[in-house]
Image: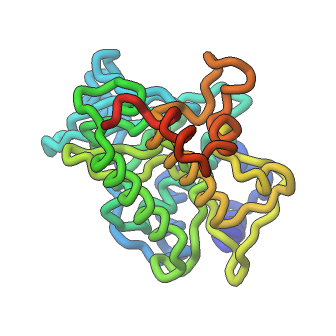
Amino acid sequence: MPFGLVSAWNKRRNCKSEDLTDPWIYKPAEYWKLKDQNPPLKRRHGSSVFTLKEMEEATNSFNEGNLIGKGGFGRVYKGLLRSGEVVAIKKMELPPFKAAEGEHEFRVEVDILSRLDHQNLVSLIGYCADGKHRFLVYEYMHNGNLQDHLNGIGEVKMEWPLRLRVAIGAARGLAYLHSSSSVGIPIVHRDFKSTNILLNTNFEAKISDFGLAKLMPEGQETYVTARVLGTFGYFDPEYTSTGKLTLQSDVYAFGVVLLELLTGRRAVDLNQGPSDQNLVLQVRHILNDKKKLRKVIDPEMK
């Protein structure tokens, strides 16, 4: 949450700043009303507010038949809104000791996605903050995520032209986030990976999951943090060793995704031997040797 918003919120509620780490203290409706009165960034388009009852209706009471994915902060269901629109609904599910962390990601994702508008970013339809319940409602992406297709989960065979198209789409989405002209402040995604690249009916790539995204400090190209966040296998080595987060941290992760597109392998595969588990370490020494390079290119691709 931006510092200015925290200050206003503390004055409004006359509470201590550390109280904001308790997700059950604040009143969602009052929070979002205040947030819109003092937005840190220019809002691009509005997001709908849903009730718990609407989320239950849309997913048939979270029927397992509607489950389409699981993540670190909950499950994702296919849903049908009262308007007839098909959506993806992320139900935040966290143990009590991670509740504050999940609440922070929820707020960040709503705050950022409600201000972005690009064809290569997944659109946020709305959210639900009803009591202890938290939901994020996105546009539905019919072809799932990139990693599943690279690992044979999907009916469409990904030949090189399609993989190149996905790479270009993802690159355009990142370029939009990194451009200060888009919302005034460059944004580092911080968790760019193949499972966060979703594909629509036309296999157009869209970046998703902005819970770890970071707005870079104004006028600065580096943000130093003591806590490294993201997914193992996609970490920029400099970020890992020094805690210095930059736009290039996303670019490194994009390079790992390119290797996945070329090889059809996961960034980290624990089913492989110790020396072959990390894709980057496995192939970096052969990238300049055309003869060896052919051996690591995905055999499923002509």
Which colouring convention does the figure follow? rainbow
Q: Residue at x 41, y 65 (%)?
A: 172
Q: Residue at x 52, y 34 (%)?
A: 296
Q: Position of residue 118 (x, y in %)?
A: 35, 66
Q: Taking the image as drawn, is residue 293 in sight?
A: yes
Q: Is residue 213 left or right of residue 112?
A: right
In the picture, which quadrant includes the C terminus? top left
Q: Taking the image as drawn, is residue 8 in sight?
A: no
Q: Residue at x 35, y 29 (%)?
A: 300
Q: Count how many numbered circles sit on residues in the image.
A: 0
- Image height check: is 102 above or below 30? above
Q: Is residue 59 left or right of residue 128?
A: left
Q: Position of residue 49 (x, y in %)?
A: 35, 51
In the picture, which quadrant includes the N terminus? bottom right
Q: Residue at x 69, y 18 (%)?
A: 273
Quadrant in the picture for residue 285? top right
Q: Position of residue 123 (x, y in %)?
A: 34, 55
- Image height check: is 12 above or below 219? above
- Image height check: is 241 above or below 11? above
